[in-house]
Amino acid sequence: MANNVVLLGAQWGDEGKGKIVDLLTERADAVARFQGGHNAGHTLVIGGQKTVLHLIPSGAMRPGVDCLIGNGVVVNIEQLLKEIDNLKSMDIEIENRLMLSMACPIILPHHIALDLAREKAKGKKAIGTTGRGIGPCYEDKVARRGLRLGDLFNAKLFAEKLREVMDYHNHALVQYFKQQAVDYQQTLDSIMPLVERLRPMIGDVSERIYNLRQNNKSVMFEGAQGMLLDVDHGTYPYVTSSNTVAAAAAIGTGIGPLELDHVLGVVKAYTTRVGSGPFPTELFDEVGQWLGEKGHEFGATTGRPRRCGWLDAVALKRTRQVSGLNALCVTKLDVMDGLEVVKICTSYQYKGESITLPPYGADALGECTPVYETMPGWKEVTAGVRDYESLPTNAKKYLGRISELIGLPIDIVSTGAERDDTMVLKHPFINQG
Ligand code: GDP
Ligand code: IMO
Ligand code: MG
């Protein structure tokens, strides 16, 4: 039975989505990205070799798998070609199986300049963006002045639209932010020579996915970021500028919502966050530091240290609700090996009341105090364990409690960065429907 499976980050990103997409794609025909851009950093480790993908879907390492970039993704052309060339240097041919939607917004140099200028102007209130121009590019899309991949094929019109939009933004950059203007001619000259190479890769992703479905093929929809970074449902304004929830998979590729068969939420066994914004279960003690060191918690895109804390079942309940999750995949269980006790946040204290769903927005969430349930940890090593029954009893109890609190089965457990350090109890491409 062919399936369309959506895989999402259930927390603040970096849950290990890339690893799981790569693994599950052994049974898929295509992988599609549907939102975000190269703010994402998805790490794959195969046979000891590490690859970090930012824009190219994590099906790249599976030779027969098509890689699709839907209209919801904002594309930095130079980054795209850099990643393609990098894969080529590893003998991975991607150009002939990569398709980008002609409706993808293009990230331009002024978007990056604006992203950086805004962050600088915000000072202490900065969002801590990746500085990749993601927010300003989405703004241009919604403001209906953005340039899209399809625009590249009419050089004259492209040049005209580019001048107009750059005049507009350079005004803000110079007059309001007191920064340097971005040079129009230089921008145009850096893009136009790349068009011929891009041309064969740009197409109709909506039609492609529709046809795959008609032919009983399976597609993996690869989320970027995580639910709590969703522009509507996350910790606004400390969010990214796209929707990261399951429904975005339909809009961001151009298929109907009922074509999505299964939604898998990827959850780190604890919680991390990069950038600013509220994080109720954040740890400022040696346990937090320990998780960061043992879990190598540094951003795959910017190298910034990730903030670490306990698992937050309150936030995960919201993820389950807004994305209609069917099952969970728990990653990085091994990082918790050796802890005396493990904790799960089961409710928040907010304005003198106990609540079990997070309030909307950063201000309210910032006023929430976590209430924990404490469980004994495990001394045994789970790192590299590939058989569920071999897990320590207390690790199984921890997983069982997570499943119980969120009300979802845990179909996959990951115990290491390596592709095969994974227990697939139920494979989304075989067992559904
Ligand atoms: P993504 O953005 O969700 O794809 O996640 P990242 O790649 O940014 O961050 C996840 C990090 O954890 C990467 O360095 C992975 O190699 C690593 N990783 C993934 N799963 C596991 C696991 O189960 N155990 C350990 N120790 N590391 C893991
Ligand atoms: P993956 O796909 C973790 C965070 C940034 C910042 C906020 C807004 O690897 O899980 P942006 O540049 O998007 O405007 O930044 O979002 N952020 C991520 N955090 N993982 C990511 O992607 C992220 N992409 C953006 O740190 O707080
Ligand atoms: Mg990441």
Image (cartoon, rainbow, N blue to C red):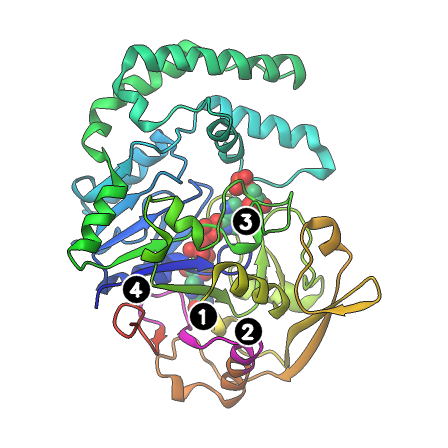
Q: Residue at x 71, y 61 (%)?
A: 284
Of mark 4 and mark 3, the one earlier in the sequence is 4
Q: Which residue is mark 4?
A: 23
Distance between the alpha carbons at the discs numbered 4 and 3:
25 Å
Of mark 4 and mark 2, the one earlier in the sequence is 4
Q: Residues within 10 Å of mark 1 (few under 14, many from 20)?
A: many
Q: Which residue is mark 3?
A: 230
* Camera sees residue 331: yes
| Residue depth check, mark 4 versus mark 2: number of the one nearer the observer | 2
Q: Residues within 10 Å of mark 3 (few under 14, many from 20)?
A: many
Mark 2–mark 1 contact, CB under 8 Å? yes
Distance between the alpha carbons at the discs numbered 2 and 1:
9 Å
* Camera sees residue 89: no
Q: Is residue 277 magenta?
A: no
Q: Position of residue 237 (x, y in %)?
A: 65, 43
Q: Which residue is mark 2?
A: 406
Q: Secondary structure at mark 2?
A: helix
Q: Amino acid at mark 2?
A: Ile
Q: Amino acid at mark 1?
A: Leu
Above or below — where is 323 with respect to 176? below
Compared across the picture, whether 350 is left or right of 193 comes to: right
Q: Secondary structure at mark 4?
A: helix
Compared across the picture, whether 334 is left or right of 98 comes to: right
Q: Residues within 10 Å of mark 2 (few under 14, many from 20)?
A: many
Start-end of magenta stretch? 401-421
Q: Amino acid at mark 3?
A: Asp
Mark identifier at residue 328? 1
